[in-house]
Protein backbone atom coordinates (compact mmCIF):
# COMPACT_ATOMS: atom_id res chain seq x y z
CA UNK A 1 0.00 0.00 0.00
CA UNK A 2 2.87 2.37 0.84
CA UNK A 3 4.44 1.67 -2.54
CA UNK A 4 1.18 2.44 -4.29
CA UNK A 5 0.82 5.72 -2.38
CA UNK A 6 4.36 6.73 -3.31
CA UNK A 7 3.63 6.05 -6.99
CA UNK A 8 0.41 8.10 -6.86
CA UNK A 9 2.14 11.02 -5.14
CA UNK A 10 5.05 10.89 -7.56
CA UNK A 11 2.70 10.88 -10.55
CA UNK A 12 0.73 13.83 -9.19
CA UNK A 13 3.93 15.75 -8.50
CA UNK A 14 5.14 15.13 -12.06
CA UNK A 15 2.01 16.52 -13.68
CA UNK A 16 2.09 20.28 -14.23
CA UNK A 17 -0.57 22.36 -12.57
CA UNK A 18 -3.34 23.42 -14.96
CA UNK A 19 -3.10 26.87 -16.48
CA UNK A 20 -6.21 28.58 -15.10
CA UNK A 21 -5.80 31.70 -17.21
CA UNK A 22 -8.87 32.83 -19.16
CA UNK A 23 -8.55 35.19 -22.08
CA UNK A 24 -10.05 36.59 -25.27
CA UNK A 25 -10.29 34.62 -28.49
CA UNK A 26 -8.12 35.55 -31.46
CA UNK A 27 -10.04 37.81 -33.82
CA UNK A 28 -9.69 35.45 -36.77
CA UNK A 29 -9.43 31.70 -37.35
CA UNK A 30 -8.77 31.98 -41.08
CA UNK A 31 -5.97 30.00 -42.70
CA UNK A 32 -3.97 31.30 -45.69
CA UNK A 33 -5.87 29.12 -48.17
CA UNK A 34 -9.33 30.27 -47.06
CA UNK A 35 -10.26 32.28 -50.13
CA UNK A 36 -13.70 33.90 -50.53
CA UNK A 37 -14.51 31.35 -53.26
CA UNK A 38 -13.60 28.39 -51.03
CA UNK A 39 -15.61 29.82 -48.12
CA UNK A 40 -18.66 30.36 -50.36
CA UNK A 41 -18.36 26.79 -51.65
CA UNK A 42 -18.07 25.51 -48.09
CA UNK A 43 -21.21 27.38 -47.07
CA UNK A 44 -23.13 25.87 -49.98
CA UNK A 45 -21.97 22.37 -49.02
CA UNK A 46 -22.73 22.94 -45.33
CA UNK A 47 -26.39 23.67 -46.05
CA UNK A 48 -26.83 21.09 -48.84
CA UNK A 49 -28.44 17.73 -47.93
CA UNK A 50 -26.80 16.19 -51.00
CA UNK A 51 -23.91 15.27 -48.69
CA UNK A 52 -26.12 12.68 -47.01
CA UNK A 53 -26.75 9.34 -48.71
CA UNK A 54 -30.47 9.82 -48.03
CA UNK A 55 -30.27 13.35 -49.48
CA UNK A 56 -32.31 14.78 -46.64
CA UNK A 57 -29.75 15.69 -43.95
CA UNK A 58 -27.30 18.60 -44.20
CA UNK A 59 -24.58 19.65 -41.79
CA UNK A 60 -26.93 22.52 -40.93
CA UNK A 61 -29.69 20.12 -39.96
CA UNK A 62 -27.98 19.61 -36.60
CA UNK A 63 -25.82 22.76 -36.64
CA UNK A 64 -28.36 25.44 -37.46
CA UNK A 65 -27.89 29.19 -36.97
CA UNK A 66 -31.38 29.50 -35.46
CA UNK A 67 -30.25 27.28 -32.59
CA UNK A 68 -26.77 28.57 -31.81
CA UNK A 69 -25.27 26.43 -34.59
CA UNK A 70 -26.49 23.35 -32.70
CA UNK A 71 -30.03 21.88 -32.66
CA UNK A 72 -31.53 22.73 -29.23
CA UNK A 73 -32.37 19.06 -28.68
CA UNK A 74 -31.09 16.76 -25.91
CA UNK A 75 -29.77 14.47 -28.66
CA UNK A 76 -30.11 14.82 -32.43
CA UNK A 77 -32.24 13.10 -35.05
CA UNK A 78 -30.39 12.37 -38.27
CA UNK A 79 -31.80 10.38 -41.18
CA UNK A 80 -35.51 9.58 -41.59
CA UNK A 81 -36.63 12.76 -39.84
CA UNK A 82 -37.88 16.18 -40.91
CA UNK A 83 -37.85 19.65 -39.40
CA UNK A 84 -35.23 21.68 -37.56
CA UNK A 85 -34.30 21.85 -33.90
CA UNK A 86 -36.84 20.82 -31.24
CA UNK A 87 -39.50 20.54 -33.96
CA UNK A 88 -37.59 17.80 -35.78
CA UNK A 89 -39.57 14.54 -35.84
CA UNK A 90 -39.22 11.09 -37.34
CA UNK A 91 -41.06 10.66 -40.61
CA UNK A 92 -44.01 8.27 -40.63
CA UNK A 93 -42.91 4.65 -40.55
CA UNK A 94 -39.29 5.43 -39.72
CA UNK A 95 -37.39 3.25 -37.30
CA UNK A 96 -35.95 5.28 -34.44
CA UNK A 97 -32.18 4.92 -34.23
CA UNK A 98 -31.18 7.10 -31.29
CA UNK A 99 -28.09 9.25 -31.20
CA UNK A 100 -26.86 9.33 -27.62
CA UNK A 101 -24.82 12.54 -27.41
CA UNK A 102 -25.85 16.16 -27.46
CA UNK A 103 -24.94 18.12 -30.59
CA UNK A 104 -22.03 20.49 -29.84
CA UNK A 105 -22.26 23.91 -31.44
CA UNK A 106 -20.00 24.46 -34.43
CA UNK A 107 -19.62 28.11 -33.37
CA UNK A 108 -15.97 28.74 -32.47
CA UNK A 109 -15.12 25.07 -33.13
CA UNK A 110 -12.29 26.38 -35.31
CA UNK A 111 -10.51 27.20 -32.02
CA UNK A 112 -10.94 23.76 -30.43
CA UNK A 113 -7.79 22.81 -28.56
CA UNK A 114 -6.40 26.34 -28.26
CA UNK A 115 -4.41 26.90 -25.05
CA UNK A 116 -3.11 30.01 -23.35
CA UNK A 117 0.53 30.69 -24.10
CA UNK A 118 0.99 27.80 -26.54
CA UNK A 119 1.12 27.60 -30.35
CA UNK A 120 -2.19 26.54 -31.87
CA UNK A 121 -2.26 23.83 -34.54
CA UNK A 122 -5.71 23.57 -36.22
CA UNK A 123 -4.80 20.16 -37.64
CA UNK A 124 -4.78 18.82 -34.08
CA UNK A 125 -8.08 20.38 -32.94
CA UNK A 126 -10.01 17.72 -30.98
CA UNK A 127 -13.55 17.04 -32.14
CA UNK A 128 -16.62 15.38 -30.61
CA UNK A 129 -17.30 14.66 -26.94
CA UNK A 130 -14.63 11.96 -26.91
CA UNK A 131 -11.92 13.77 -28.96
CA UNK A 132 -11.90 10.84 -31.38
CA UNK A 133 -10.82 12.80 -34.44
CA UNK A 134 -8.75 15.92 -34.96
CA UNK A 135 -9.39 18.92 -37.23
CA UNK A 136 -12.52 20.37 -38.76
CA UNK A 137 -11.69 18.56 -42.00
CA UNK A 138 -11.61 15.13 -40.34
CA UNK A 139 -14.79 15.87 -38.38
CA UNK A 140 -16.77 16.68 -41.53
CA UNK A 141 -16.54 13.10 -42.84
CA UNK A 142 -17.66 11.32 -39.66
CA UNK A 143 -21.42 12.10 -39.92
CA UNK A 144 -21.34 11.18 -43.63
CA UNK A 145 -20.13 7.71 -42.66
CA UNK A 146 -22.54 7.23 -39.74
CA UNK A 147 -25.76 5.39 -40.52
CA UNK A 148 -27.73 7.24 -37.82
CA UNK A 149 -26.58 10.68 -38.95
CA UNK A 150 -26.32 11.05 -42.72
CA UNK A 151 -25.81 7.60 -44.32
CA UNK A 152 -28.91 5.63 -43.39
CA UNK A 153 -29.10 2.23 -45.09
CA UNK A 154 -28.43 3.54 -48.60
CA UNK A 155 -24.81 2.39 -48.81
CA UNK A 156 -22.09 0.81 -46.71
CA UNK A 157 -19.85 2.83 -44.46
CA UNK A 158 -16.90 1.94 -46.69
CA UNK A 159 -18.67 3.37 -49.74
CA UNK A 160 -20.25 6.41 -48.09
CA UNK A 161 -17.56 9.00 -48.81
CA UNK A 162 -16.92 7.97 -52.42
CA UNK A 163 -20.70 7.90 -53.02
CA UNK A 164 -20.97 11.45 -51.63
CA UNK A 165 -18.24 12.61 -54.01
CA UNK A 166 -20.02 10.98 -56.94
CA UNK A 167 -23.29 12.71 -56.07
CA UNK A 168 -21.50 16.05 -56.21
CA UNK A 169 -19.88 15.16 -59.54
CA UNK A 170 -23.35 14.58 -60.98
CA UNK A 171 -24.30 18.22 -60.35
CA UNK A 172 -23.03 20.68 -62.99
CA UNK A 173 -23.02 23.58 -60.55
CA UNK A 174 -20.56 21.81 -58.25
CA UNK A 175 -18.37 20.79 -61.18
CA UNK A 176 -18.12 24.48 -62.04
CA UNK A 177 -17.56 25.70 -58.47
CA UNK A 178 -14.84 23.17 -57.61
CA UNK A 179 -13.06 24.10 -60.87
CA UNK A 180 -10.85 21.01 -60.54
CA UNK A 181 -11.48 17.34 -59.73
CA UNK A 182 -13.95 16.92 -56.86
CA UNK A 183 -12.41 14.90 -54.04
CA UNK A 184 -13.33 14.19 -50.44
CA UNK A 185 -10.32 16.22 -49.33
CA UNK A 186 -11.46 19.28 -51.29
CA UNK A 187 -14.99 18.91 -49.92
CA UNK A 188 -13.79 18.89 -46.33
CA UNK A 189 -11.34 21.72 -46.93
CA UNK A 190 -14.15 23.92 -48.25
CA UNK A 191 -16.50 23.08 -45.36
CA UNK A 192 -13.72 23.75 -42.85
CA UNK A 193 -12.91 27.08 -44.49
CA UNK A 194 -16.54 28.12 -44.04
CA UNK A 195 -16.65 26.87 -40.44
CA UNK A 196 -13.60 28.98 -39.64
CA UNK A 197 -15.78 32.04 -40.34
CA UNK A 198 -18.30 30.91 -37.70
CA UNK A 199 -16.61 32.56 -34.75
CA UNK A 200 -17.67 35.06 -32.09
CA UNK A 201 -14.50 36.78 -30.85
CA UNK A 202 -16.06 40.14 -29.96
CA UNK A 203 -18.30 39.29 -27.01
CA UNK A 204 -18.42 41.56 -23.93
CA UNK A 205 -16.06 39.08 -22.24
CA UNK A 206 -13.55 39.32 -25.11
CA UNK A 207 -13.68 43.10 -25.12
CA UNK A 208 -13.26 43.18 -21.34
CA UNK A 209 -10.24 40.87 -21.49
CA UNK A 210 -8.71 43.08 -24.19
CA UNK A 211 -8.89 46.07 -21.88
CA UNK A 212 -12.37 47.59 -22.21
CA UNK A 213 -13.37 47.55 -18.56
CA UNK A 214 -16.85 48.89 -19.38
CA UNK A 215 -17.69 45.90 -21.59
CA UNK A 216 -18.92 43.73 -18.69
CA UNK A 217 -21.41 44.79 -16.05
CA UNK A 218 -20.50 44.83 -12.37
CA UNK A 219 -22.60 41.69 -11.85
CA UNK A 220 -20.82 39.92 -14.70
CA UNK A 221 -17.44 40.85 -13.25
CA UNK A 222 -18.53 39.51 -9.85
CA UNK A 223 -19.61 36.29 -11.54
CA UNK A 224 -16.24 35.94 -13.25
CA UNK A 225 -14.45 36.43 -9.92
CA UNK A 226 -16.68 33.78 -8.30
CA UNK A 227 -16.04 31.47 -11.27
CA UNK A 228 -12.30 31.68 -10.73
CA UNK A 229 -12.49 31.49 -6.93
CA UNK A 230 -14.64 28.34 -7.10
CA UNK A 231 -12.02 26.60 -9.23
CA UNK A 232 -14.13 26.37 -12.39
CA UNK A 233 -11.10 27.55 -14.38
CA UNK A 234 -9.21 24.39 -13.43
CA UNK A 235 -11.00 22.80 -16.39
CA UNK A 236 -12.73 25.73 -18.08
CA UNK A 237 -9.70 27.81 -19.02
CA UNK A 238 -7.95 29.36 -21.98
CA UNK A 239 -9.57 31.38 -24.77
CA UNK A 240 -12.29 28.73 -25.28
CA UNK A 241 -12.90 28.24 -21.54
CA UNK A 242 -12.04 24.55 -21.92
CA UNK A 243 -8.94 22.46 -21.35
CA UNK A 244 -10.28 20.03 -24.01
CA UNK A 245 -9.33 17.08 -21.79
CA UNK A 246 -11.46 14.06 -21.00
CA UNK A 247 -12.85 13.94 -17.45
CA UNK A 248 -15.03 11.50 -15.52
CA UNK A 249 -17.85 13.36 -13.76
CA UNK A 250 -20.12 10.48 -12.84
CA UNK A 251 -22.16 10.40 -16.05
CA UNK A 252 -21.87 7.44 -18.40
CA UNK A 253 -22.70 6.82 -22.03
CA UNK A 254 -25.33 4.12 -22.42
CA UNK A 255 -24.16 3.34 -25.96
CA UNK A 256 -20.48 2.76 -25.22
CA UNK A 257 -20.12 2.67 -21.41
CA UNK A 258 -17.73 5.61 -21.75
CA UNK A 259 -17.27 7.51 -18.48
CA UNK A 260 -14.91 10.29 -19.60
CA UNK A 261 -16.00 13.21 -21.74
CA UNK A 262 -14.37 16.38 -22.98
CA UNK A 263 -14.70 19.62 -21.06
CA UNK A 264 -17.19 21.65 -23.10
CA UNK A 265 -16.51 25.25 -23.99
CA UNK A 266 -18.51 27.78 -21.99
CA UNK A 267 -18.76 30.22 -24.86
CA UNK A 268 -22.19 31.30 -26.17
CA UNK A 269 -23.96 29.06 -23.65
CA UNK A 270 -27.14 31.14 -23.68
CA UNK A 271 -27.72 29.92 -27.23
CA UNK A 272 -26.82 26.23 -26.91
CA UNK A 273 -29.09 24.58 -24.32
CA UNK A 274 -29.62 21.80 -23.36
CA UNK A 275 -26.30 20.96 -21.74
CA UNK A 276 -23.94 18.08 -20.86
CA UNK A 277 -22.94 15.28 -23.21
CA UNK A 278 -26.35 13.63 -22.88
CA UNK A 279 -28.34 16.86 -23.14
CA UNK A 280 -29.93 16.12 -19.79
CA UNK A 281 -29.66 19.59 -18.24
CA UNK A 282 -32.01 22.18 -19.67
CA UNK A 283 -30.71 25.21 -17.76
CA UNK A 284 -27.38 26.48 -16.49
CA UNK A 285 -28.82 26.40 -12.95
CA UNK A 286 -29.22 22.63 -13.32
CA UNK A 287 -25.62 22.32 -14.48
CA UNK A 288 -24.32 24.33 -11.52
CA UNK A 289 -26.37 22.25 -9.07
CA UNK A 290 -24.98 19.06 -10.63
CA UNK A 291 -21.38 20.17 -10.07
CA UNK A 292 -22.17 21.50 -6.62
CA UNK A 293 -23.25 17.97 -5.64
CA UNK A 294 -20.15 16.23 -7.00
Image (cartoon, rainbow, N blue to C red):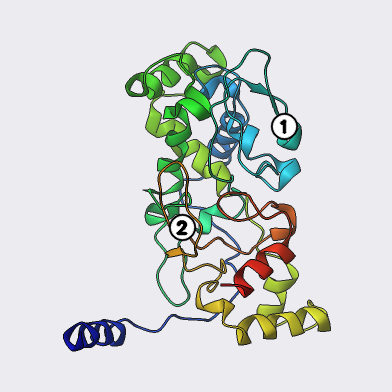
Q: Position of residue 2 (x, y in %)?
A: 19, 89
**For this rendering, which residue is in front, 121 or 218?**
218
Helix, strand or loop at mark 1: loop
Instruction: Say if mark 1 contacts mark 2, CB within 8 Å.
Output: no
> Toward which corner of the image does residue 206 lie, by quadrant?
bottom right
Q: Is residue 108 visible?
A: yes
Relative to 60, say whether 221 is above or below: below
Specify the quadrant that holds the N terminus. bottom left
Position of 263 with respect to 269 (left or right) is left
Secondary element at tag 2: strand
* As drawn, 66 above or below 217: above
The residue that mark 2 highlights is 261
Residue 194 lies, in percent from the top left, at 57, 42
Cα distance, mark 1 to mark 2? 26 Å
- Look at mark 1 in the image and give the residue it sits on: 84
Q: Residue at x 61, y 31 (%)?
A: 77
Q: Can residue 181 be seen at all in this image of the molecule?
A: no
Across and down, in percent, residue 146 comes to 44, 29
Position above or below: 38 against 158 = below
Q: Nearer the viewer, residue 289 or 218?
A: 289
Residue 230: image x %, image y %? 61, 84
Q: In the image, is 260 to the left or to the right of 158?
A: right
Q: Name which of mark 1 and mark 2 comes first in the sequence.
A: 1
Amino acid sequence: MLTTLVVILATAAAEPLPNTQIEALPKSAALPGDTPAKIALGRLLFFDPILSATRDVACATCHHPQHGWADARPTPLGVHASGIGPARRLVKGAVFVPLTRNTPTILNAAFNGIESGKPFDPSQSPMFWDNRVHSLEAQALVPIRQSEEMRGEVCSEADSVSAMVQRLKNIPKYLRLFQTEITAEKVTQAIAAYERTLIAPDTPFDRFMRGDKTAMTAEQQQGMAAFQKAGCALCHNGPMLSDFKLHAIGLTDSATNRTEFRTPSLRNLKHTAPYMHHGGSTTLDEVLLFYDRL
